[in-house]
Amino acid sequence: MRTIEWRNGTVITIDQTKLPHETVFLEMKTSNEVAEAIKTMKIRGAPLLGAAAAYALALTAYYSEAKEREELIKELERTAEILRGTRPTAVNLFWAIDRILSKAIAFSGNAKDLVAFIVEEAQKIADEDAEANRLIGNYGAELICGGDVILTHCNAGALATVEYGTALGVIKAAWDHGKKIRVIATETRPKLQGARLTTYELKRVGIPVTLITDNMVGYAMRQQLVDKVIVGADRIVQDAVINKIGTFTIAVLAKEHKIPFYVAAPKSTFDLIHNSAEVTIEERNPEEITHIGSQRIVTEDVEVLNPAFDITPLKYVSAIICESGILYKKEFVKFKA
């Protein structure tokens, strides 16, 4: 089953804030509903954000009453600005918006034909992501040996994509190829995507998983409990991988313990015209740290720093797995502008 789908003018997706206790489906008919779901992390995961943004533009087109092509394009541009303001770090969202807008502007037909074209293009983006993830899984499975214990951080599975997953896609493909592996999942404070989502996904497909807190990674590596690390990415720039906060710490620990550190991501995550200094790191609500659920756990008026992502220089990355294959360190020079 796909994480997100288009059904006759309705975008249907799982509300990820309800998992693992409830499976609740969102049915959205407006781009504003999609934007709000992205902002509140009901929809999350870099590749999924790209597909969701494309579908949001498709909703704008589908329900537009514009008679002229130019009027419809203006509506799309207004929707695009709202979507761009939801989450600033994951590049897939911006990539999908730019792809839809540029093709809409270049389209030579009338408004009615443009609507059909945009819906079709949004569906293509979703289909391409599903296919890319399958390829990433198959390529990455080559790096996995039977008996490996793989550490992963945050959630880079089917829930973070249209279908199958990136880092978890590699793990699933290795498992499907008959490799008896085990996974260590970090809880991923403060939103607990590893605890809530990654363990949920792995248990559903029968892959053995052990949950640890984020600050246990060094212990696990020192005790030789980890053979490889595989994570996803929200943006890959000329000199670094931007991913969920805590990724950099894990990469440094992996290098210290001589453990391969792999990044799995589709090419829609590559932003090779920028470097890490040019990326806006999302700063989230302090209550994600000061509260667990509705319960405050710290004293009032404590200063809070809550970046959602961190920056891992490419020197810590053993290889990047994308739908075109495996890029090793010697090929990272291609990332330089």
Image (cartoon, rainbow, N blue to C red):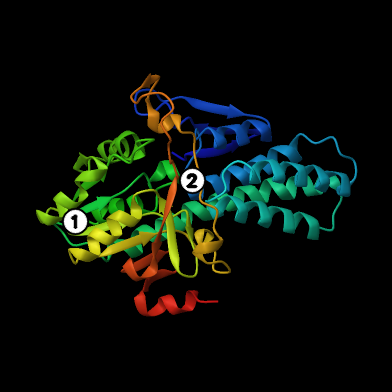
Quadrant location, the N terminus: top left
* Residue nearer the viewer, 95 or 40: 40
How far separated are the C-alphas under marks 1 and 2? 25 Å
| Residue 173 percent location from the top left of the image | 30, 55
Q: Is residue 321 above or below residue 82?
A: below
Quarter of image, res 228: bottom left
Q: Quadrant of the C terminus?
A: bottom right
Q: Position of residue 3 (x, y in %)?
A: 47, 39
Residue occupying image coordinates x 40% and y 56%: 134
Which of the labelled discs sits on residue 281, or is there none? none
Mark 1 touching mark 2, by CB under 8 A? no
Name the residue that disc number 1 marks. 179
Asked where in the image residue 324 lies, by quadrant, the reply is bottom left
Res 72 → quadrant: top right
Task: From the image, tell me which residue sits under label 2.
Answer: 162
Helix, strand or loop for disc 2: loop
Outermost residue, top direction? 294
Amino acid type for the residue under numbered disc 1? Lys
* Mark 1 surroundings within 10 Å by alpha-carbon count, few (fewer than 14), some (14 through 19), many (20 or more): some
x then y, percent, for residue 219? 14, 50
Q: Return the residue found at the far right.
A: 68
- 286 lies left or right of 122: left
26 left or right, relative to 329: right
Residue 170 visible at all: no
Circle 2 packing at 10 Å, graded few (<14), some (14-19), many (20+), is many
| In-image side of 15 versus 21 (left or right) | right
Instruction: Give coordinates of residue 207: x percent, y percent.
Output: 22, 44
The answer to which of 81 and 266 lies nearer the viewer is 81
Name the residue: 79% across, 60% down.
Answer: 106
Depth order, front residue of 86/117? 86
